[in-house]
Amino acid sequence: MKQVEEYCTYLQPESAKALEELYHPISECYDNVNIPVSVIGSSNDWIFADREQQLVAAAYRTKPIMLKNLCHDMMLDPEWEKAAAVILECF
């Protein structure tokens, strides 16, 4: 809990543009992406539900890599090594 309090001191309001984009559905603009994309999600993400993560992966024509019990900000999760290992495997 102490880490949560510490991290909260670094948080700032999200940009208006980012918040606005959350209200738009996944669009066809992803068709222009011609590089490999990895979608790494978590079943414990409070920001994006599993279904939303599945839709993002489908838009990029890939399958999501779903980790269990990591928070939305995986790099701050006590088990961040799980996400880091998946990223390293992608390369």
Image (cartoon, rainbow, N blue to C red):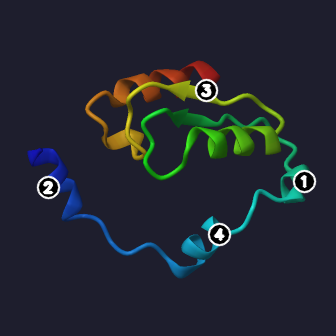
Quarter of the rendering containing residue 51:
top right
Binning the other alpha carbons within 10 Å of mark 3 as few (below 14), some (14 to 19) or many (20 upward) gives some
Q: Nearer the viewer, residue 34 or 76?
A: 76
Is the C-beta separation of discs 3 and 4 under 8 Å? Answer: no
Q: Nearer the viewer, residue 41 or 25?
A: 25
Q: Amino acid at mark 1?
A: Asn
Viewer-side label of 1, 2: 2
Indicate which disc, 1 or 3, sits on the residue closer to the N terminus. Answer: 1
Indicate which disc, 1 or 4, sits on the residue closer to the N terminus. Answer: 4
Residue 37 shows in this picture: yes
Q: Could you tell me how far apart the alpha carbons at marks 1 and 3 are, in whole angstroms?
A: 22 Å
Query: Is residue 29 found left or right of 46 in the rendered image?
Result: right
**Circle on res. 23:** 4
Per the image, the residue denoted by label 2 is 5
Q: Could you tell me how far apart the alpha carbons at marks 1 and 2 are, in whole angstroms?
A: 40 Å
Indicate which disc, 1 or 2, sits on the residue closer to the N terminus. Answer: 2
Per the image, the residue denoted by label 1 is 32
Q: Amino acid at mark 2?
A: Glu
Query: Is residue 85 found left or right of 27 in the rendered image?
Result: left
**Circle on res. 89:** none
Please provide percent x and percent y for residue 60. Answer: 80, 42
Is the C-beta separation of discs 1 and 4 under 8 Å? Answer: no
Binning the other alpha carbons within 10 Å of mark 1 as few (below 14), some (14 to 19) or many (20 upward) gives few
Per the image, the residue denoted by label 3 is 65
Q: Residue at x 43, y 48 (%)?
A: 46
Please provide percent x and percent y for residue 50. Answer: 58, 38
Q: Residue at x 44, y 25 (%)?
A: 68
